Image: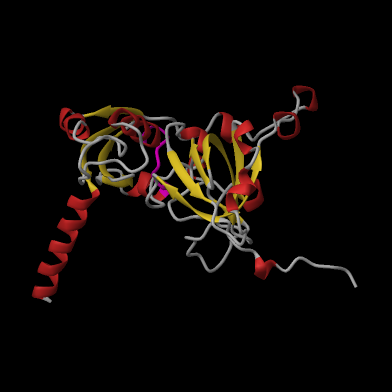
Amino acid sequence: MSSRINLTKLQPIGYLKSCFVEKNASPRQPSICPSSRAQLVIDCHFTNPHHTLIGLEQFSHVWLIFLFHMNENTHVRAKIKPPRLDGEKVGVFASRSPHRPNPIGLTLAKLDKVDGNVINLSGIDIVDGTPIVDIKPYIPDYDCPSPDQGVNVASWLTVPPVKPLTVQFTSQADENLQQFFPGESNVVSTKYQLQLLKSNQEARSVIHDIIASDPRSTYRRNKCSNEIYHFTIDILNVSCRFEDDVAIVTQIEPIDDVQHMQAKLKKVTDVHE
């Protein structure tokens, strides 16, 4: 009798703490946002989980294998519409869509530091709370095909129909951003204290890179182009608008302020219902 892997026993080795709090506007690939940051605590069945990371600090990059735990689709389609194709379809296996028969993801991240059973990462594209099922070191000699092997990629990746956007920050947005400071500073924790990002300039870089790649879905790009677009990174709630090939960041607020306002509006709505 042939042996089979019991997939029901697949257990996460830890859950990623990421600067991308929600799916909305999270990068579609890690190379889009090199300044993004995340942290992974190895917390699995090992008695000494830090032993699993001995020697990993010798590598600059790692592969993370993870689960698309926030997928809500109940039916996987054979053909999908990558956002960069602006409505055109390709086969699901010719894409990196999260909506797959088995919701398994693979991403390459920069390894910044190993501290005990904690891994600090950057250049990440994974949402906060994502279950990580494995880590493998990136080895160029094994993982990167040599040029003489004839490496090809689809033309829609090299010359995509959706072009990068020019990003502008209003003076109000820049003023908002100056209020935020890194978590390791000797300041009493406030709603302006960043959790993972190292400075307000790093936060600005992440915001710029996300918007420049146009994070909107095809539907929102074509049907709701005049609406204000909101997304969250770290503890910042960002608002922007789009005008043709230009994206303008209009406001940056602490998540606490936004959540407080949403709760207040809900109370008012409940009273009138």
Residue 268, relative to residue 54: is it above or below?
below
Q: Magenta residues? A: 211-218
State yes or no: residue 215 in magenta.
Answer: yes
Residue 266 makes an appearance in the image: yes
Q: Which of the 4 image quarters holds residue 245?
A: top left
Callout count: 0
Residue 269 vertical placement versus 254 (above, below): below
Residue farthest along the bottom direction in this orientation = 273
Give percent across and percent down for residue 80. 56, 53
Q: Nearer the viewer, residue 83 or 148?
A: 148
Q: Residue furthest right?
A: 1
Q: Position of residue 70 (x, y in %)?
A: 47, 60
The verdict on residue 4 being magenta is no
- Main secondary structure found in the magenta portion: loop
**Where's residue 79, x and y in %?**
60, 54
Residue 35 drawn at (x, y percent): 42, 32
Work out which quarter of the rendered image holds the C terminus and state it: bottom left
Task: State left or right for residue 79 relative to residue 29.
Answer: right
Residue 95, visible in the rendered structure? no
Which residue does the image show at 32% across and 37% down from the upper left? 184
